[in-house]
């Protein structure tokens, strides 16, 4: 990946050294990093007293001090990360986004509109709800792909082996398009199909041959593999096969089923979001 703009989303517990895997790639690949540090501010606890139109409200003692302290900590972290990236020679713009927790995913989605890829830091998993909302905000409200578990891997942005989980449809096609800068430099790509179904109208085609031809024409070294699930959950089987292929990155279309169904009953997308063993790039 070269000459791209990456949005890196971090939480309050992030450390400058967490960016080491990205700073090296940013320097050698002429990447520009936009780092967003998210900080949830204390909610406004308004107390009312009085009656009717003569009522008034007041804030408890200490609330403003809590907000000021939270902002000061975020600014300190911003300064530390800015200095670290500058020392590493990486092109970067480090910003703080503070506010109510419900507003933070919207800020991430807006910033992602003009970026090539979004990387969500592992530290954001400390707040499970915020992590999930940020990932979904990017998937459903931004054109960029979102990469998870990339900050604990030195090869996520420059993978040697990529495992593309292919299922004919818009989400998978968008994921491959979003990952093309990464796929084009990989040494080998495995296009994986799980329990493929051959329809009557496409009975003469080998499943996966269309995407393999597409990638091969771009100079990629592609192998198509079909895997039976054997009754296991697809996400679990996918992780096993990606590990067998020694994949540095998994690329997959997200929420091929409805979002509600995935949230309530679980599914392949949720399995890939929850796992922390392998970097994964998702796009809806």
Image (cartoon, rainbow, N blue to C red):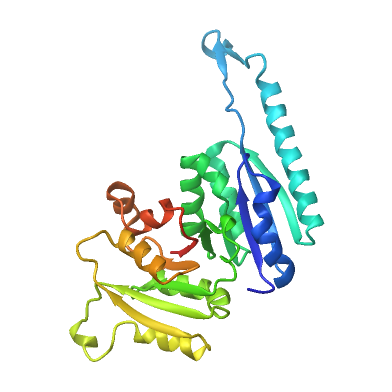
| Viewer-closest of 119 and 116 | 119
Residue 234 location, x and y as percent? 29, 62
Residue 186 location, x and y as percent? 54, 78
| Viewer-closest of 214 and 59 | 214
Q: Residue at x 52, y 8 (%)?
A: 51
Is residue 186 visible in the rendered image? The answer is yes
Residue lying farthest to the top in this orientation: 50
Q: Residue at x 34, y 82 (%)?
A: 208
Horizontal relation, residue 82 to residue 267: left or right? right
Horizontal relation, residue 203 to residue 223: left or right? left
Residue 74 location, x and y as percent? 70, 38
Residue 17 higher or lower than 101, as above or below: below
| Viewer-closest of 125 and 44 | 125
| Viewer-closest of 63 and 77 | 77
Q: Residue at x 52, y 40 (%)?
A: 126
- Tell me the quadrant of the picture where the C terminus can be found: bottom left
Q: Quadrant of residue 159?
A: bottom right
Q: Quadrant of residue 67?
A: top right
Is residue 257 visible in the rendered image? The answer is no
Residue 100 higher or lower than 30, as above or below: above
Residue 3 location, x and y as percent? 69, 73
């Amino acid at each position: 990946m070269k000459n791209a703009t990456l949005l890196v989303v971090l939480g309050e517990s992030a450390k400058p050294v967490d960016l080491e895997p990205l700073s090296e790639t940013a320097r050698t690949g002429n990447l520009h990093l936009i780092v967003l540090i998210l900080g949830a501010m204390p909610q406004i606890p308004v107390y009312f007293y009085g009656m009717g139109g003569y009522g008034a409200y007041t804030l408890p003692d200490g609330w403003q001090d809590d907000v000021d302290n939270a902002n000061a900590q975020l600014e300190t972290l911003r300064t530390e990360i800015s200095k670290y990236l500058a020392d590493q020679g990486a092109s970067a713009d480090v910003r703080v986004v503070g506010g109510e927790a419900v507003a933070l995913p919207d800020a991430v989605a807006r910033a992602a509109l003009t970026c090539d890829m979004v990387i969500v830091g592992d530290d954001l998993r400390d707040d499970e709800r915020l992590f999930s909302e940020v990932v979904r905000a990017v998937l459903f409200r931004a054109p960029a792909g979102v990469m998870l578990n990339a900050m604990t891997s030195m090869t996520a942005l420059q993978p040697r082996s990529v495992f593309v989980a292919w299922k004919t449809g818009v989400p998978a096609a968008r994921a491959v398009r979003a990952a093309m800068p990464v796929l084009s430099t990989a040494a080998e790509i495995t296009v994986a199909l799980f329990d493929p179904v051959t329809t009557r109208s496409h009975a003469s085609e080998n499943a996966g041959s269309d995407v393999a031809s597409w990638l091969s024409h771009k100079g990629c070294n592609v192998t198509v593999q079909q895997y039976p699930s054997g009754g296991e959950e697809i996400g679990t089987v996918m992780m096993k096969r990606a590990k067998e292929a020694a994949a540095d990155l998994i690329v997959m279309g997200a929420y091929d089923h409805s979002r509600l169904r995935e949230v309530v009953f679980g599914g392949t997308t949720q399995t890939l979001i929850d796992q922390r063993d392998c970097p994964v790039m998702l796009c809806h």
